[in-house]
Amino acid sequence: VYQADLPSGKTIAVRAFTSAREDRTETYGRISEYLQLKRLNALVNFRYFEKGIRASDGRFYPLVTMDWVPGATLYEWTQKQCRQRNTQALRQVTDRWVEMVDELASQSIAHGDLQHANVLVTQSGELKLVDYDSMCVPKLVGRKNLESGVKPYQHPGRNEQTRLSPSLDN
């Protein structure tokens, strides 16, 4: 993921994929379509481009752009708070975590990869989620995973054959 500054002054995250998958375009389309109807505090705007970047060999590869989230990964942020013995900040983010998970569940959304590098903590202590490859929205229930997430953060029974469902984050 790269940080890009647009001529308009806006900063975005840019992620290029190194392989094409037929179902990626449809998956990101369904996610985008659903999230446009739902404004959740922890989710950020993104766009998927099937032919987003051209390599030196002339082939096109997919690209995702996403609002840039200034902040620290949950791991970095938690490590800093623990070193400073800032139990109040840890308690507040714990409450925000529960609110975030409840909000996702209330909209039948699973992020699918709630690992520490995909959760960013802003200066104000808000939680923002990035990397929507494993996300499940209602129109994707029952489909195959694009990604099965980082193993230590997943249910031990989850693998490449696990079907998408709103309970993936449980």
Image: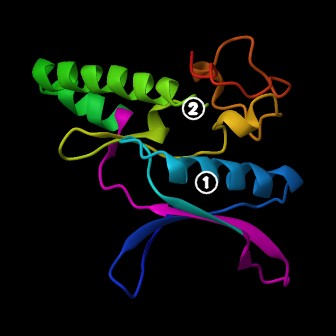
Residues at discs 1 and 2 in contact (Cβ within 8 Å): no
- Which residue corresponds to the image point at 64% horizontal and 37% vertical from the top-left? 137
Under mark 1, the amino acid is: Ser
Can you identify the residue that label 1 sits on? Answer: 32
**Which quadrant is the N terminus positioned in?**
bottom right
Which segment did they paint magenta?
A: 50-74
Marks 1 and 2 sit apart, C-alpha to C-alpha, by 12 Å
Identify the image quadrant of residue 82: top left
Q: Earlier in the sequence, mark 1 or mark 2?
A: 1
Can you identify the residue that label 2 sits on? Answer: 109
Q: How many discs appear?
A: 2
Rendering coords of residue 74 (x, y %) = 36, 34
* Mark 2 Cα-neighbour bin, 10 Å: few <14, some 14–19, many ≥20: many
Under mark 2, the amino acid is: Ile
Residue 85 in view (yes/no): no
Rendering coords of residue 168 (x, y %) = 64, 22
Determine whether, in the image, residue 35 is placed left or right of residue 63.
left
Residue 39 in view (yes/no): yes
Could you tell me what secondary structure mostly forms the magenta stretch?
Answer: strand
Where disc 1 sits, the SS reads helix
* Mark 1 Cα-neighbour bin, 10 Å: few <14, some 14–19, many ≥20: some
- Which residue corresponds to the image point at 53% horizontal and 54% vertical from the top-left? 36
